[in-house]
């Protein structure tokens, strides 16, 4: 295999899991780094749970992340079809070859017989595995089982007393003893191949050069290697990346945070933020830099810096990384992302309103420094759209002081005289008001905040006021103080 070819082969039984997204990313980046191909293949032999809806959701999630395949589902290619249920005829040819060469056999054991077998082995403190009951069936015995209406599975005949050696690009040399495996099913009784068989045929016929996947698949690898060897097929290079654990060092689950990519889409994470975080779950760059674009990762990523140790999914780290990418993002892009959340919060009625768009853009430029993800915009932007009811007793006392009406009129007059309101201009207006009325800062800043927002804390006034404009400032002052300016 001269050309680097990697694949991502999800099972379409639900949304794209965060662990699957990382596997897809590692495969994609390695292919890009080495100028190779990235293939998307669908493993849909779980007929009861697989759906085209899940397949579409997975494809959408990959595209959102920024992963694009140059071969496979939708893209086509020379080694299709790229959906397993459309490759059954191909699998059957290889099954026949294994049967003819004696590497596989038909097993007629019933589910109850298999369950009894496992229980008996457990009672003897043995590792449960198939005991080979059907390995040496005579023709007459097979005919008797068929006459009973039994439908066989097909098992791979595991050689005895052999070491299966895996030269893993991440874990080094890993050895498994064949005697601990037992003859395993490669075709179910309904004629559908199992994962361990179909994946070998797919990877071989699609000329996959590297298989990069999660550590949980390592125990499957000796079964697959034996099939490669029995069929005389060239093996790909294997790389098993670390597990993803929660902060408590247990297996990643919903209690540690969202486990599917669509949840992060809905929460307003940037794709580059999630990608940056995912790549650091098991891969470490040279140097101290932690923030990367996809384009940079395509140049930097390689398997020699992938760690063996489990990676910890740290939501705080994810939020920090995404926050950094929000600061780097263009305000127009952030505004487009913010608009749906503001409509959802009923701050806006129409996302196509140009005036509303420009206001949101000004708001985004002000509050993006406080955003970890865009769904926070609703809470952070609240006071930019309406003041809160004046309910705090201390706030009421402050705004009721005798000098307040004159101070507010002086301040608004200072704002009205300026050609453009910017944060620096607003700061200047505060100073002018303090000087004109011989007032201290606390006698101006807090009353203005209360008059405009109804509360005693919130966004900086020099950032809020340019967004509101003079007319809305007058309306808010009247609403909160009944002072008409």
Image (cartoon, rainbow, N blue to C red):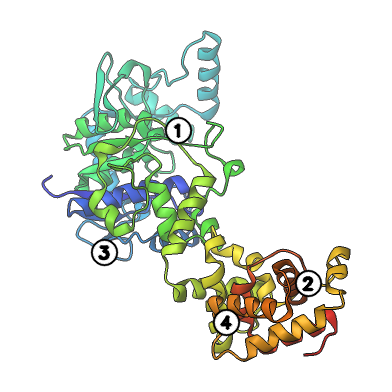
Q: Are marks 3 and 2 in contact (CB under 8 Å)?
A: no
Relative to residue 111, is residue 445 drawn left or right? right
Q: CA distance from mark 3 to mark 2?
A: 60 Å
Q: Which mark is residue 121?
A: none
Q: Which residue is mark 4?
A: 359
Tell me where residue 343 appears, x and y as whole percent: 63, 76
Report helix, strand or loop for mark 4.
helix
Quadrant containing the C terminus is bottom right
The residue to which callout 3 is attached is 76
Residue in the picture at 55% in, 64% down: 374
**Which residue appears at 69% of the width and 68% of the height?**
441
Residue tagged by mark 1?
147
Q: Earlier in the sequence, mark 1 or mark 4?
A: 1
Percent of width and height locating residue 325: 43, 60
In-front residue for pair 205/295: 295
**Disc 2 target residue:** 454
Mark positioned earlier in the residue sequence (3 or 2): 3
Residue 476 shows up from this direction = no
Mark 2 neighbour density, 10 Å: few (under 14) some (14–19) many (20 or more): many
Cα separation between marks 2 and 4: 21 Å
Label 1 residue SS = helix
Measure the alpha-carbon separation of dots 1 and 3: 44 Å
The reply to whether residue 195 is visible in this rendering is yes
Locate the N terminus and report the quarter of the image it occupies. Answer: top left
Q: Secondary structure at mark 2?
A: loop
Vertical placement of residue 455 versus 285, above or below: below
Of the numbered discs 3 and 4, the one sitting upstream in the chain is 3
Q: Are marks 1 and 2 in contact (CB under 8 Å)?
A: no
Q: Relative to 104, is 332 on the left or the right?
A: right
Q: Nearer the viewer, residue 31 or 422?
A: 422
> Mark 4: few, some, or many residues within 10 Å (few <14, many ≥20)?
some
Q: Secondary structure at mark 3?
A: loop
């Amino acid at each position: 295999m001269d050309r680097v070819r990697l694949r991502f082969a999800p099972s379409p039984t639900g949304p794209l899991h965060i662990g699957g997204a990382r596997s897809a990313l590692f495969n994609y980046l390695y292919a890009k780094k080495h100028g190779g191909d990235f293939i998307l293949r669908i493993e849909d032999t779980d007929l009861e749970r697989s759906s085209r809806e899940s397949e579409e959701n997975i494809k959408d999630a990959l595209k959102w992340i920024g992963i694009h395949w140059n071969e496979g589902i939708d893209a086509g290619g020379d080694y299709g079809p790229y959906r397993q249920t459309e490759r059954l005829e191909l699998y059957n040819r290889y099954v026949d070859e294994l049967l003819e060469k004696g590497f596989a056999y038909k097993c007629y054991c019933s589910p109850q017989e298999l369950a009894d077998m496992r229980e008996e082995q457990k009672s003897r403190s043995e590792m449960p595995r198939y005991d080979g009951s059907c390995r040496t069936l005579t023709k007459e015995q097979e005919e008797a089982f068929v006459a009973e209406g039994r439908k066989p599975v097909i098992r791979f005949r595991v050689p005895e007393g052999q070491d299966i050696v895996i030269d893993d690009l991440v874990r080094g040399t890993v050895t498994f003893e064949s005697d601990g495996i037992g003859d395993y099913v490669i075709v179910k009784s309904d004629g559908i191949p199992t994962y361990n068989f179909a994946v070998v045929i797919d990877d071989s016929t699609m000329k996959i050069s590297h298989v990069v996947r999660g550590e949980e698949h390592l125990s499957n690898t000796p079964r697959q290697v034996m099939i490669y060897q029995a069929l005389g097929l060239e093996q790909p290079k294997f790389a098993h990346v670390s597990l993803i654990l929660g902060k408590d060092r247990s297996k990643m689950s919903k209690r540690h945070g969202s486990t599917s990519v669509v949840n992060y889409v809905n929460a307003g994470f940037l794709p580059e933020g999630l990608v940056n975080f995912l790549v650091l779950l098991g891969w470490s760059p040279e140097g101290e830099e932690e923030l990367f674009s996809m384009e940079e990762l395509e140049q930097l990523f390689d398997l020699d810096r992938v760690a063996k140790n489990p990676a910890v999914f740290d939501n705080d780290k994810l939020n920090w990384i995404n926050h950094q990418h929000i600061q780097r993002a263009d305000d127009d892009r952030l505004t487009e992302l913010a608009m749906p959340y503001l409509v959802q919060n009923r701050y806006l009625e129409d996302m196509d309103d140009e005036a509303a768009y420009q206001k949101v853009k000004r708001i985004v430029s002000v509050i993006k420094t406080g955003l970890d993800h865009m769904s926070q915009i609703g809470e952070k932007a609240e006071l930019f759209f309406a003041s809160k009811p004046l309910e705090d007793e201390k706030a009421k006392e402050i705004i009721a002081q005798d000098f307040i009406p004159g101070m507010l009129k002086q301040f608004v007059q200072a704002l009205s005289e300026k050609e453009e309101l910017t944060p620096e201009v607003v700061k200047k207006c505060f100073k002018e008001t303090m000087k004109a009325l011989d007032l201290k800062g606390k006698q101006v800043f807090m009353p203005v905040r209360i008059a405009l927002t109804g509360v005693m804390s919130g966004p900086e006034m020099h950032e809020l006021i340019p967004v509101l404009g003079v007319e809305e400032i007058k309306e808010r002052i009247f609403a909160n103080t009944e002072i008409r300016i």
